[in-house]
Image (cartoon, rainbow, N blue to C red):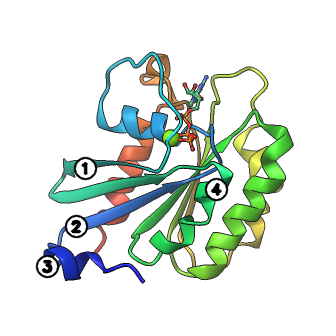
Amino acid sequence: ALPSWSTLLGPRPPDWRQVLVLGLDGAGKSSVLHYICSETAKERIAPTQGFNSARLYIEGLEMDLLEVGGSQNLRAYWPHYLSQAHVLVFVVDSVDRSRLLTARQELHALLAEEPRLPLVVLANKQDKSDALSAAELHDELALHTLSDQREFFLLPTSATWASLSTSTSVLHVKSLLVSLLSQP
Ligand SMILES: Nc1nc2c(ncn2[C@@H]2O[C@H](COP(=O)(O)OP(=O)(O)OP(=O)(O)O)[C@@H](O)[C@H]2O)c(=O)[nH]1
Ligand SMILES: [Mg+2]
């Protein structure tokens, strides 16, 4: 087994929170992270080969956002990070109909391991004209089967610079994370 964080670096500060960001390759995880952490235009975002992380200090919290890449060979690593996460953000490409079933299976496999981990599903790429709506994704991802015990949110998002000032801005995700993680 890998050594735990506390073995390596001592105990986490009490205001430390980890946001685990997962989802299939190309869903938009790195883009979401980028626009949550920096409101600057970015032309190209490369596929994540391993991990991608960012730290935010916000409203008294030290929030680490950890993305594990979504390509098939990296998905095997996903479950390893669940136990230290305070919330799971699962990003879905709302246009990628052919892989919705895969996304659903991967998501439910993760949820089965952590019955109480709060979940935020992002119906991403809402700026595209053929995007499924959040309500359609709710059905396709079988989110009605989630237990009442789990805190759960589903947000329509667009992780693009042009969308930062719109109703699907990822800045709403940032606010949601702050309010979720500020709870004692
Ligand atoms: N139009 C549009 N494009 C997006 C959006 N989010 C991401 N993209 C694009 O989709 C592609 C993949 O985005 P990434 O952020 O790299 O996806 P990822 O989930 O990090 O993928 P991996 O790192 O390979 O697992 C990039 O070309 C992004 O610019 C969105 O909301 N709208
Ligand atoms: Mg990425």
Give the quadrant of the C terminus: bottom left
Residue 71's place in the image compared with 8, above or below, is: above
In the rendered image, residue 130, in percent from the top left (x then y), is placed at: 79, 25
The residue wearing badge 4 is 73
Q: CB under 8 Å between callouts 2 and 3?
A: no
Badge nearest the viewer, 3 or 4: 4
Label whose residue precedes the other's in the sequence (4 or 2): 2
Task: Return the x and y of residue 71 as percentages of the image width and height.
Answer: 63, 48
55 and 119: which one is in front?
55
Read off the residue under disc 1.
55
Q: Nearer the viewer, mark 4 or mark 1?
A: 4
Does residue 143 lie above or below 40 as drawn? below
Q: Earlier in the sequence, mark 1 or mark 2?
A: 2
Question: Foreground mark, 2 or 3?
Answer: 3
Q: Residues within 10 Å of mark 2 (few under 14, many from 20)?
A: some
Q: Nearer the viewer, residue 1 or 30?
A: 1
Q: CA distance from mark 4 to mark 1?
A: 25 Å
Do the numbered discs 1 and 2 sit on residues whose CB atoms are within 8 Å? no
Q: Which residue is mark 3?
A: 10
Judge from the rendering whether residue 98 lies leftward or rightward of residue 167; answer left or right: right
According to the picture, the residue beneath numbered tag 2 turns out to be 16
**Quadrant of the rendered image containing residue 25:** top right
Please tell me which residue is depicted at 73% across the width and 54% down the height of the picture.
103
Q: Secondary structure at mark 4?
A: helix
Q: Label 3 amino acid?
A: Gly
What element does badge 3 sit on? Answer: loop
Kindly identify the amino acid type of the residue bearing the numbered disc 4. Answer: Asn
Instruction: Tell me if I can see residue 36 in this picture.
Output: yes
Question: Which sits in the foreground, 38 or 47?
Answer: 47
Tag 4 and tag 2, C-beta contact below 8 Å: no
Residue at 44% from the left image edge and 20% from the top image edge: 161
